[in-house]
Amino acid sequence: MMKLKIVFLITLILSFSVSATTQVKGLRVWTSPEDTKAVIDLSGQVDYKLFQLENPPRIVVDIENAKVARKFSVKNNSVIRKIRNGRKGKTTLRLVFDLRSKQKAKSFLLKPAKQYGHRLVIQLSKPKVKTKTIVQKHQNKDRDVIIAVDAGHGGEDPGASGVSGTREKTITLQIAKRLADSINKEKGMKAVLIRKGDYYVALRKRFKKARENRADLFVSIHADAFRDPKVHGMSVYILSKKGATSEAAKWLAQSENNSDLVGGVVLEDKDNVLAKVLLDLSQNASMEASHKAAKKVLSALKLIEKPHKKNVERASFVVLKSPDVPSMLIETAYISNPKEEKRLKTKKFQQKLAGSIKDGIKQYFYQSPPPNTWIANHITTEKHTVSSGETLGAIAQSYKVSMRELMRLNNKVSNNIRVGEVLILPKIIP
């Protein structure tokens, strides 16, 4: 009798789990220059089928044992014209995506991560035309140095949030755009934005885009959080193969790397042994350059205020693992600190950050210009040791450089100098 009861209970549980209806809780659409993602929020795991129709182009998704409480709408989207939902039989929910043009569709399920539950992601992209790509080296003998500016997080991945609800993805994009504008005003320098809007870019795709743009430097902008709301200050990170150099750096690196799970991209490492060896060799050279550039940027940021750590930090950020592009990650402030959250939202503080980061980048390239660049061909840097009785103004005049430029390149907030101090002096070659 007991065995019959157990069998009955197991049968009842199994039949309930099979017949349980999954709720479609919401649908969000994110469009980037590369693709459009429709993210469907679900109350649990589902079985589904996806197929495409033409004339007119449509994507049809059938979700088993699912229902939705309301209709979905999409406004002013360049790819999806309309989203319809209905029933197929008694238990199947059918979603129809009416498209403006033919698209290549991919789909995948995501397990719960951070603030998100189960999700079904529909990825739409233009069918690619096969072309033969020839990678060419820089041909221009007077080219600009290219700085890839990366705004952290975006789209499905909001990043950290402040007490008042400020989202990291919003702040980083604002600062990144200001930094790009500041860089583009400098002769011989050009900025490339990795993310221009509110959409997600996978971590490895970020440095891949930097390489595609033949960037000479990759700068990732963040404004993260920590457990303790009192933690404050700016930090500059470069890649560490051996791991983080502090508990805060380790926790932060793990947090940033996990954002790929939130953003909807599954990373698959397919490198073979030979590729790994070559990657290590290339990374060693780029890490050395990364450290030099990061030190200049940190020195420039110190002019704003005392940083969180006085030295450049090292952590295993995925976004910094470019094999041949010097890279750094800048924590502009801690959004978890109420005072810093308030400052991060102001145009004045954002502009100050952008200006200081640009000054550090400029100082690095003036001292270590890549070959065949305008800076390499037109800017020479000399070192001047201050002697007794000299003034900053007199030194600037003798080298035919403005005092303001001299102060910026040497990270000075005043015209005070000391005997024995070594100054960097740029000179434009006609």
Image (cartoon, rainbow, N blue to C red):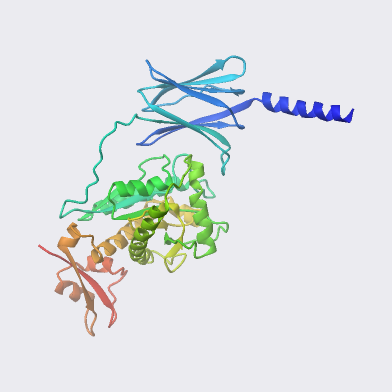
Q: Is residue 109 visible?
A: yes
Does 258 sit above or below residue 121? below
Q: Residue 290: where, in percent of width, then height?
A: 35, 62
Using the rendered view, name the quadrant where residue 427 is placed. bottom left
Give me the residue at 48% from left, 51% from top.
256
Using the rendered view, name the quadrant where residue 304 is placed. bottom left
- Looking at the rendered image, the quarter that the C terminus falls into is bottom left
Looking at the image, the residue that sits furthest to the left is: 430
Give me the residue at 22% from left, 50% from top.
137
Q: Residue 278: where, in percent of width, then height?
A: 36, 57
Viewer-closest of 109 and 201: 109
- Looking at the rendered image, the quarter that the N terminus falls into is top right
Does 43 sit above or below residue 231? above
Viewer-closest of 358 and 117: 117
Does 42 sit above or below residue 245? above
Does 203 sit above or below residue 365? above
Left/right placement of residue 209 relative to residue 153 reads left
Q: Residue 425: where, in percent of width, then height?
A: 21, 70
Using the rendered view, name the quadrant where residue 374 is placed. bottom left
Looking at the image, the residue that sits furthest to the right is: 1
Looking at the image, the residue that sits furthest to the bottom is: 388
Give me the residue at 12% from left, 64% from top.
429
Left/right placement of residue 21 relative to residue 257 reads right
Q: Residue 354: where, in percent of width, then height?
A: 34, 55
Q: Is residue 174 visible?
A: no
Left/right placement of residue 213 relative to residue 98 reads left
**Total residue callouts:** 0
